[in-house]
Image (cartoon, grey):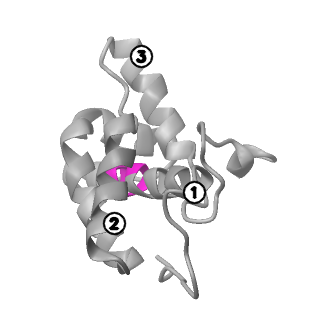
Amino acid sequence: MEEGRALRRPLLANGCIVKDYEPLYKYWEVAEKRGVEKATIRSEDVEYVKKVVEASGRVSLLELKRTLSFMMLDRVNGEIAKEAYTMLGLELNEREAREKLADILAGWLLEACLTLNVISLRGWRLPED
């Protein structure tokens, strides 16, 4: 891993959920070269999380992250995701690459919600991959 690479984070991310954003940056690089829209989080996503938390009270971080990952799948182009991971030395099929990038987007959204004080986490720990 290049020195400092893991510290590169998108807007409102803090690294407490997603440890390495490099696959997302590679995805953006490939998407830009191909003229395809970059997969990002949106203000509506933050509003969705806010509504879920307000309606449910306490929410399992793992379950919320799974739901958000599923929501993010449509934003990720499998071919571009696969190429991004290949650039990082990982050979994944399109489905695996899409799912991993959707998971990064979901984690970024949760970090953004934390940064914006939309959610707070108490006594939590995500399982290691």
Q: Nearer the viewer, mark 2 or mark 3?
A: 2
Q: Which residue is mark 2?
A: 54
Sequence-first disc among 2 and 3? 3
Q: Which residue is mark 1?
A: 117
Q: Which residues are magenta?
A: 100-105
Nearest to the observer: residue 38 or residue 13: 13
Q: Residue at x 25, y 37 (%)?
A: 75
Dot 2 alpha-carbon crowd within 10 angstroms: few under 14, some 14 to 19, many 20 or more: few
Q: Which residue is mark 3?
A: 32
The amino acid sitting under disc 2 is Glu
Dot 3 alpha-carbon crowd within 10 angstroms: few under 14, some 14 to 19, many 20 or more: few
Sequence-first disc among 3 and 1? 3
The amino acid sitting under disc 1 is Asn
Relative horizontal placement of residue 3, taking residue 15 as reference (left or right):
right
9 in magenta: no
CA–CA distance in space, label 1 to label 2: 13 Å
Relative horizontal placement of residue 98, taking residue 31 as reference (left or right):
left
Relative horizontal placement of residue 34, taking residue 108 as reference (left or right):
left
